[in-house]
Image (cartoon, rainbow, N blue to C red):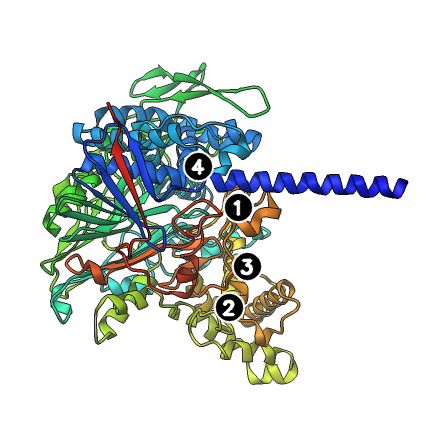
């Protein structure tokens, strides 16, 4: 009897589990995007057809632009609504409403910046045409929200309904790009301020150059603002008395940036100009970009947008192609505040004390009471939540100046020539970017977009008081004064986040650009290639050569002498592994995994004693510099005996050998089941491209995340920049007069729905370096939007 009851209970339990699984699957399946049939859409003036190809890429056909963008709003919402909602919430400081305490710090940061207030101002002052465009997009998004039978599954999991989309939400998405691409310089300024206070000036100059051998080669050794310095032996020796702190040094390899280059018609057989662009960003599921194609009358555009912001970030029409890279400059200053010693609610401005303006913010926290914060405002910007050397600082940043933000990049879609494009982007208020163009007449151009401050009294490197009026910003560099090149004689222009200008340019753009290797390698290959076409450009985007690491290979082999190996035969394994390196970061490359770890270990062990004083002054200090190899290689080449970082060793060679052995031991410990001689780069460099929910729902990680594929490429020292969750967020190659030959490749897929066939179908192309056409392929589905009946 007991046995029957037990069987009965187990059967009932299994049945209930199966019902729950079936219900969950039905709910998930019911929220798949609709790709066929007819859907009524409000405010349409005429029907719009959206065809979808075998990768889920939509091609929109409309009679006018507003109808087209209404339809774009609907289809991006049905594919990416949760992603859109997360972006606006993050930038408005409203994530804790969904995720509770874990998101409070992010919300405090966003509320302190006041992005939601900036978005209100910017959206109100947009030109009427841009307002109409954003409103039409919002209308399409809201039609989906109101009419869908099932929202994306994330809304069900988190038990909430999305609010209507507003035009300011698209501006919030744009401000998120400012945050992603330019806010990092706050940490640079904090680092340099601590270094200035703590270290001798010649040490700071030595440790923080703005150049390397590859950049110098590209610029023909033109003078820079922070040139490489001789080793300040005496000053560095004085710093060796402090114990080293290993966590005071971090490498700056995964650079939020991109590769882009253009070749003019003078370089190609049929006189076509070609643009190539791959933007390097953090990778997640879904991918950051949403690709689409749009035909309005005779106008034809294709490329990628941010879901929620209806403008082509990179793309092409029939006459012009455009791409971008992060300018990697400094457009944020920390203004040191002088407080009234008798009234901490006042700060000094000129010859008087001025009261802080205050804004009270209430942050809703899921499962808890609201958290209240008070944001202090100055005439220069909000007061940071984090002091600097125990002194309050205000954040003065182009992203917080509504006059410096606009959506003029929307107008690129109608531009016809490189000169028109240059004129448009020079007046745009976007994140600061390098912009590259190619047109159907074989012409090419490079310039910058986004507002560059005109500083006086300081260069923005370290925090200063602006109270006496002797330092600050005096507006922005005019569009006429922005750097630009059109049709250079050599017929090639490129940007890989490297420093493109020298000391001769009168305005400070930045100081910590990407090292010059990627740009150097691109130029080298473009000069070597016999045929320049879309396919050779695409192959160059996949280049994994890394001359950058040759120095470290030779350094290691130099200390692994035959005599030493005779005494310690086990070192022969390390030597053979390094000799097996093929000079690349391919998945099958041997030796590269050790070289990468060796370089990192050297940087930490060499510099930690010299910056230990900084860590003692500021516990949050990290020495992180993109040109770290310039001072590092100087020390490792000259090997001054007085500057041996660790006196436990008799000389530099003994110290270097120890770092090599330590790196080898770390590598073996991380991969205990692999022989060193068999450890390929692909075994180490694996994809970890995740959905935001997968860590909290590990049982669903295989459904939600991309496969952990072996990846070719490396951080900042390969054209094919890649890491576990970082890399080329798109790869595009296009000649505007030959769109049928163009290529556009993205990781993951078009859809954010894990049951969609378009959720991960492009990932294999991205991993293996296989091309997908820019233009949508043969129609697999057809959806018609029809005007709502009056």
For the residues labelled 3 and 1, the Cα–Cα distance comes to 15 Å
**Discs 4/1, front:** 4
| Rendering coords of residue 766 (x, y %) | 40, 60
Q: Which image quarter is the C terminus in?
A: top left
**In the drawing, what numbered circle is on residue 605?**
3
Secondary structure under badge 1?
helix
Asked if labels 1 and 3 touch by Cβ distance under 8 angstroms, the answer is: no
For the residues labelled 1 and 2, the Cα–Cα distance comes to 36 Å
Q: Is residue 416 left or right of residue 62?
A: left
Tag 4 or tag 3, which sits nearer the N-term?
A: 4
Asked if labels 1 and 4 touch by Cβ distance under 8 angstroms, the answer is: no
Tag 1 or tag 4, which sits nearer the N-term?
A: 4
* Residue marked by disc 1: 613
**Discs 3/1, front:** 3
Residue 156's place in the image compared with 205, above or below, is above
Q: Residue 451, can we see it?
A: no
For the residues labelled 4 and 2, the Cα–Cα distance comes to 35 Å
**Discs 4/2, front:** 4
Tag 2 or tag 4, which sits nearer the N-term?
A: 4
**In the drawing, what numbered circle is on residue 82?**
4
The number of callouts visible is 4
Residue 215's place in the image compared with 446, above or below, is below
Residue situated in front as seen by the camera: 450 or 169: 169
Secondary structure under badge 2?
helix
For label 4, the crowd category at 10 Å Cα-Cα, with few meaning under 14, some 14 to 19 and many 20 or more, is some
Residue situated in front as seen by the camera: 120 or 376: 120
* Residue marked by disc 2: 681
């Amino acid at each position: 009897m007991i046995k029957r009851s037990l069987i009965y209970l187990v059967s009932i339990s299994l049945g209930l589990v199966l019902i729950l699984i079936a219900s969950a699957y039905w709910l998930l399946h019911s929220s798949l995007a609709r790709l066929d049939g007819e859907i009524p859409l409000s405010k349409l003036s005429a029907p719009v057809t959206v065809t979808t190809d075998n990768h889920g890429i939509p091609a929109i056909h409309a009679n006018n632009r507003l109808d087209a963008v209404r339809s774009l709003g609907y289809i991006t919402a049905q594919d990416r609504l949760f992603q859109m909602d997360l972006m606006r919430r993050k930038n408005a400081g409203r994530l804790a409403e969904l995720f509770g305490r874990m998101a409070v710090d992010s919300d405090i940061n966003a509320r302190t910046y006041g992005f939601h207030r900036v978005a209100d101002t910017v959206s109100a002052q947009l030109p009427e045409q841009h307002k109409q465009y954003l409103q039409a997009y919002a209308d399409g998004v809201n039609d989906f929200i109101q009419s869908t039978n099932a929202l994306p599954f994330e809304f069900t999991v988190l038990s909430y309904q999305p609010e209507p989309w507003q035009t300011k939400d698209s501006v919030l998405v744009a401000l998120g790009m400012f945050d992603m691409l330019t806010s990092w310089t706050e940490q640079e300024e904090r680092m340099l301020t601590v270094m200035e206070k703590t270290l001798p000036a010649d040490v700071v100059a030595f440790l923080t150059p703005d150049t390397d051998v590859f950049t110098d080669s590209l610029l023909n050794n033109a003078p820079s603002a922070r040139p490489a310095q001789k080793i300040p032996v005496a000053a560095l020796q004085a710093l060796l008395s402090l114990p080293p702190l290993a966590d005071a040094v971090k490498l700056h390899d995964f650079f939020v940036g991109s590769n882009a280059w253009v070749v003019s018609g003078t370089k190609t057989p049929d006189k076509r100009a070609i643009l190539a662009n791959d933007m390097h960003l953090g990778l997640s599921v879904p991918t950051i970009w949403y690709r689409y194609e749009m035909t309005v009358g005779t106008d034809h555009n294709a490329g990628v947008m941010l879901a929620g912001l209806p403008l082509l970030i990179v793309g092409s029409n029939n006459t012009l192609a455009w791409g971008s890279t992060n300018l990697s400059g400094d457009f944020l200053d920390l203004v040191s505040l002088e407080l009234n010693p008798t009234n901490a609610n006042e700060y000094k401005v000129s010859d008087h004390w001025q009261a802080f303006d205050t804004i009270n913010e209430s942050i809703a926290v899921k499962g808890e009471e609201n958290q209240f914060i008070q944001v202090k405002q100055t005439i220069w910007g909000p007061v940071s939540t984090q002091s600097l050397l125990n002194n309050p600082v205000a954040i003065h940043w182009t992203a917080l100046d509504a006059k410096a933000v606009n959506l003029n990049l929307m107008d690129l879609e109608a531009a016809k020539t490189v000169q028109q494009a240059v004129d448009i982007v020079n007046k745009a208020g976007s994140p600061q970017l390098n912009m590259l163009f190619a047109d159907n007449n074989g012409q090419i151009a490079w310039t910058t977009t986004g507002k560059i401050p005109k500083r006086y009294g300081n260069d923005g490197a370290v925090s200063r008081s602006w109270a006496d009026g002797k330092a600050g910003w005096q507006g922005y560099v005019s569009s006429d004064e922005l750097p630009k090149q059109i049709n250079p004689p050599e017929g090639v222009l490129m940007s890989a986040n490297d420093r493109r200008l020298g000391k001769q340019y009168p305005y400070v753009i930045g100081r910590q650009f990407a090292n010059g290797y990627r740009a150097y390698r691109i130029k080298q290959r473009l000069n070597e290639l016999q045929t320049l076409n879309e396919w050779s450009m695409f192959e160059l985007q996949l280049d994994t050569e890394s001359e950058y690491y040759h120095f470290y290979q030779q350094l290691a082999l130099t200390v692994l002498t035959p005599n030493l190996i005779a005494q310690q035969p086990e070192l022969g394994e390390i030597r053979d592994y390094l000799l097996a390196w093929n000079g690349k970061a391919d998945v099958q490359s041997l030796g590269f995994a050790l070289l990468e770890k060796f370089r990192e270990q050297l940087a930490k062990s060499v510099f930690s004693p010299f910056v230990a004083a900084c860590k003692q002054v500021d516990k949050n200090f990290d020495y992180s510099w993109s040109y770290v190899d310039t001072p590092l290689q100087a020390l490792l080449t000259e090997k001054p005996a007085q500057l041996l970082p660790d006196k436990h060793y008799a000389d530099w060679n003994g110290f270097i050998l120890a770092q090599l052995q330590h790196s080898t031991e770390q590598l073996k410990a991380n991969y205990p089941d692999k022989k060193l001689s068999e450890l390929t780069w692909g075994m180490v460099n694996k994809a970890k491209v995740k959905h935001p929910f997968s860590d909290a729902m590990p049982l669903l990680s295989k459904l939600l995340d991309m496969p952990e594929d072996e990846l070719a490429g490396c951080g900042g020292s390969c054209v094919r920049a890649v890491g576990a969750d970082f890399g080329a967020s798109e790869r595009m190659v296009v000649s505007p007069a030959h769109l049928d030959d163009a290529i556009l490749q993205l990781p993951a897929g078009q859809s954010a729905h894990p049951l969609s066939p378009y959720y991960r179908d492009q990932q294999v192309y991205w991993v293996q370096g296989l091309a997908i056409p820019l233009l949508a392929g043969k129609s697999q589905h057809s959806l018609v939007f029809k005007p709502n009946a009056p």
